[in-house]
Image (cartoon, rainbow, N blue to C red):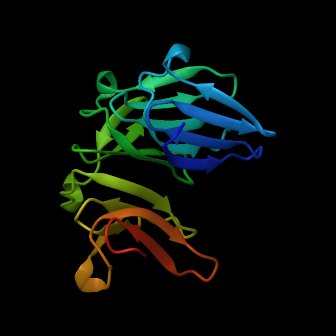
Amino acid sequence: AETVLDLAEDGEGNLWAGTHGSGLFRVRQRVFDLIGTEDGLAENNVLTVCESANGSVWLGTDGGGLHRLAKDGTLTRYHTAQGLPREYVNAVLEDRHGAVWAGTWGAGLFRLVEGKFTPFGAEHSFPPRFIRSLYEDGDGNLWIGTLLSGVFRYDGRQLQSYGVAEGLSHPDVRAILRDHTGAMWFGTGGGGL
């Protein structure tokens, strides 16, 4: 795979790599496993990877929706049949409560509840349709990186937006991390950190 789009490490020390065009790679004790369309993946462009608390791996694809790869190797696909209006999932996160969030390209942010997607944001006036990244900090806040709308912090009740006026270097937020000191870092498409 020439282009790796996302990396994640699971609780067993496996490295997962979502790729552009080659599917999902698992590196286990320096051995590569490839999971692709021939294994049931709907799309080989894997944009985002996230481990579940139960050891499953969630992956978002470029046109194939959201998939859950169970520890036994079973793939389950979640897509338009479950209410996801666009099957381009750029960001996926399972939060500390077990809720699965899917950030799409063009349809906004969704939460998977009892096997169905529910849109996030109408009650909070959250208009961004292009979600780039998702992150949960140690306090349980959900951070949502967007294309050209900056970053949002959702504390479970209120939504706060941060943009260039608040000190963000660029409004295209592609990566989010809180370091060991508690400082938040935002990787942007055009403004660095």
Q: Which residue lies at the image location 22% right of the left edge and 43% below the top edge?
A: 107
Q: Where residue 13 sits: x, y (%)?
A: 76, 46
Q: Quadrant of residue 126?
A: bottom left
- Left or right of residue 141: residue 51: right
Q: Quadrant of the N terminus?
A: top right
Q: Which residue lies at the image location 49% right of the left edge and 37% below the top edge?
A: 59
Q: Quadrant of residue 170?
A: bottom left
Q: Which residue lies at the image location 33% right of the left edge and 26% below the top edge?
A: 82
- Left or right of residue 68: residue 43: left
Q: Quadrant of residue 192?
A: bottom left
Q: Is residue 136 above or below residue 114?
A: below
Q: Is residue 27 visible?
A: yes
Q: Is residue 156 visible?
A: no
Q: Residue furthest right?
A: 29
- Left or right of residue 160: residue 18: right
Q: Where residue 70 sits: x, y (%)?
A: 63, 27
Q: Where residue 150 sits: x, y (%)?
A: 28, 69
Q: Quadrant of the C terminus?
A: bottom left
Please state which of residues 181 and 32 is positioned toward the viewer in this rendering. Answer: 32
Q: Residue furthest front?
A: 2
Q: Is residue 127 above or below residue 151?
A: above
Q: Is residue 52 above or below residue 127?
A: above
Q: Where residue 54 sits: x, y (%)?
A: 67, 38
Total numbered badges shown on the rendered structure: 0
Please state which of residues 23 and 11 is positioned toward the viewer in this rendering. Answer: 23
Please state which of residues 187 and 104 is positioned toward the viewer in this rendering. Answer: 187
